[in-house]
Image: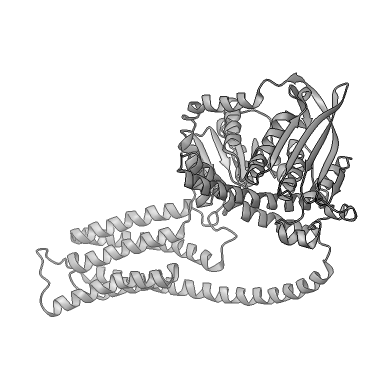
């Protein structure tokens, strides 16, 4: 359906979408012209019944006349031909049964014609199953009436209405016209479909031959690999979003100790899977040269606490002593850099230390080496007492999909991308990683990184932000929110999270429906999925931004998606969205972004892409 369709539309060209098959387009045409033809036929029968004072027939025909007009308007505004077909068949069935048992009280030619039309229409429009159902719904009452009449058992208080010869002739003629129209219309559609299938098959054979030859010449095609990884990422991240989100919700519901343990295991496993997916994608971005570093403010001690928090628990479960030491001179400083990429580097080093250490200690140390002008040079060091690495294997461990030895690969899980990503991320910033290790005595990984320093100071930034979220929880209760999402599991998850914030959202299953809801409703903010059927989130956002009403065109929009395409940042920016959150997302992160946009709708785009 075209986006230009208005309620006043009566043209069939505006409702025939180009993506529809020949058969579906034929179905819509049948409804369009059939409803017009039915309207005039019903009008003529209505006048004839009115003239003969056939009250029941007149009421039945009048209701069908109004229904045909209403369905025609529904079709020309929103061509849901399946729904309209069901409504027509239900109305025809009710009319046929009422005529059989109330008005005519007899099986005549007109009743037989109506049943045949319903049978053909239901099979052609809705398929075998629906065709059988509607055929039986009409045939069984007719056969039952014949049986009752044969036994002289059908007697009611209403007197049968008599139809004169001209009206009966008109009804029979109208029925034949509709039957001929249905049969000829679908015959042409089937012939065109068969021709199209033959042409498509021929073209497909040509394409297949060309594709097989192209495959042999495209061994170095990085674009195909990137698209594949992006698609797989989206398909994996989408269910992961539900798993991690539901785990968080269940954990926040005061579960029993045994349930809490099971939920923590499920959440930890999902996080591990997400980490593997992110590593594969990030490695692919690095190899393709499409990785972009951010330059945003962050507090280094707080970041280190967040990185090591989960690893400390993992180390304690193995009986290891984990020590995090951050230089006190960095505690009140706000640095500029890329906290996401720094997190990846430190996380991979620390998680490796925990993985390959069965007993002993793990030390993570952050030291300020030099303060010069508005810059600081920081040394990061991760040391363990694990299995260690042989000197002749130190270079191999940084190769992708490689571990220290074949025995290590069998004993320890992992895809061997962690250190490869660490080395490449540092090299892209002009840095090198230093390694010292002895088998059975442990390893030490370290590197130096320089950061610009902001003039502002840190004053418990993380705690204040969390407290702000809690204190202002009630401020979101009056927000009118539209969630545009096609995945039913993600819709359920979003509802549960939003209900916890006292928000009752409206739901749109695709971008086209979102545009309709925005046109006729009032919303304060929109959470927009990007990959959806019918219309994606990018096109829907562009359409909303073009609305003449400034209140509607200026609604804050947050992109919410599992997509990992390289150009996602630019596409979000170009479409006019205000912010971006990647699935699986942290509820607190989404909460803060909603608060920020509600209080400052004209805020500049502040993309936050995780993974």
Q: Is residue 478 above or below residue 387?
A: above
Q: Is residue 460 above or below residue 40?
A: above
Q: Is residue 411 left or right of residue 198?
A: right
Q: Residue at x 27, y 63 (%)?
A: 95
| Residue 60 image-quadrant placement | bottom left
Task: Give percent across and percent down for residue 209.
Answer: 75, 76
The C terminus lies in quadrant: top right
**Residue sitting nearer the eye, 72 or 592:** 592
| Residue 178 image-quadrant placement | bottom left
The N terminus lies in quadrant: bottom right
Task: Give percent across and percent down for residue 73.
Answer: 43, 52
The residue furthest bottom is 150
Q: Residue at x 70, y 74 (%)?
A: 203
**Residue sitting nearer the eye, 85 or 467:** 467
Task: Give percent across and percent down for residue 536.
Answer: 61, 49
| Residue 544 image-quadrant placement | top right
Q: Residue at x 53, y 64 (%)?
A: 25
Task: Give percent across and percent down for residue 358.
Answer: 71, 49
């Amino acid at each position: 359906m075209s986006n230009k369709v208005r309620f006043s539309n009566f043209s069939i060209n505006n409702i025939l979408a180009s993506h529809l098959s020949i058969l579906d387009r034929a179905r819509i045409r049948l409804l369009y012209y059939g409803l017009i033809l039915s309207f005039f036929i019903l009008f003529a029968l209505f006048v004839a019944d009115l003239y003969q004072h056939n009250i029941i027939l007149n009421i039945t025909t009048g209701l069908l006349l109004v229904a045909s007009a209403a369905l025609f308007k529904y079709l020309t505004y929103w061509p849901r031909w399946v729904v309209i077909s069901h409504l027509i068949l239900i109305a025809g069935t009710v009319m046929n049964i009422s005529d059989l048992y109330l008005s005519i009280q007899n099986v005549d030619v007109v009743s037989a014609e109506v049943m045949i039309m319903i049978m053909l229409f239901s099979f052609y429009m809705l398929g075998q199953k629906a065709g059988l159902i509607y055929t039986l719904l009409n045939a069984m009452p007719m056969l039952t009436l014949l049986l009752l009449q044969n036994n002289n058992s059908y007697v009611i208080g209403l007197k049968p209405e008599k139809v004169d010869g001209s009206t009966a002739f008109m009804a029979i003629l109208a029925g034949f016209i509709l039957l001929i129209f249905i049969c000829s219309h679908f015959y042409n559609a089937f012939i065109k479909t068969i021709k199209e299938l033959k042409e498509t098959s021929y073209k497909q054979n040509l394409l297949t031959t060309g594709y097989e030859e192209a495959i042999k010449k495209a061994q170095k095609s990085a674009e195909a690999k990137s698209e594949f990884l992006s698609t797989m990422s989206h398909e994996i991240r989408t269910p992961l979003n539900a798993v991690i989100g539901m785990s968080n919700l269940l954990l926040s519901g005061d579960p029993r100790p045994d349930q809490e343990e099971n939920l923590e295991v499920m959440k930890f496993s999902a996080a591990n899977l997400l980490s593997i997916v992110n590593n594969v994608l990030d490695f692919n971005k690095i190899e393709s040269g499409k990785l972009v570093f951010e330059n945003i403010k962050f507090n280094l001690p707080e970041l280190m606490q967040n990185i090591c928090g989960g690893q400390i628990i993992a180390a304690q479960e193995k009986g290891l002593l984990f020590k995090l030491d951050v230089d006190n001179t960095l505690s009140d400083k706000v640095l500029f850099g890329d906290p996401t990429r720094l997190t990846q580097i430190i996380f991979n080093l620390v998680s490796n230390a925990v993985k390959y250490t069965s007993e002993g200690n793990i030390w993570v140390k952050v030291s300020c080496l030099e303060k010069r002008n508005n810059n600081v040079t920081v040394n990061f060091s991760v040391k363990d007492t694990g299995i260690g690495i042989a000197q002749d294997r130190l270079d191999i461990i940084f190769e992708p999909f490689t571990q220290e030895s074949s025995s290590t690969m069998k004993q320890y899980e992992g895809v061997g991308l962690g250190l490869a990503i660490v080395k490449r991320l540092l090299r892209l910033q002009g840095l090198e990683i230093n390694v010292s290790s002895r088998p059975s005595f442990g390893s030490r990984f370290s590197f130096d990184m320089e950061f610009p320093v902001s003039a502002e100071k840190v004053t418990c930034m993380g705690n204040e932000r969390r407290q702000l979220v809690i204190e202002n929880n009630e401020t979101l209760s009056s927000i009118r929110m539209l969630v545009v999402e096609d995945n039913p599991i993600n819709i359920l998850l979003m509802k549960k999270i939003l209900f916890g914030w006292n928000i009752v959202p409206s739901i749109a299953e695709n971008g086209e429906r979102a545009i309709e809801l925005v046109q006729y409703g009032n919303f304060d903010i929109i959470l927009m999925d990007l990959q959806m059927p019918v219309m994606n989130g990018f096109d829907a956002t562009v359409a909303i931004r073009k609305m003449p009403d400034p209140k509607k065109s200026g609604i804050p929009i947050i992109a919410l998606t599992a997509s990992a395409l390289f150009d996602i940042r630019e596409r979000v920016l170009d479409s006019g969205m205000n912010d971006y959150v990647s699935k699986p997302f942290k509820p607190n992160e989404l909460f803060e972004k909603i608060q920020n946009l509600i209080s400052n709708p004209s805020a500049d785009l502040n993309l936050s892409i995780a993974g």
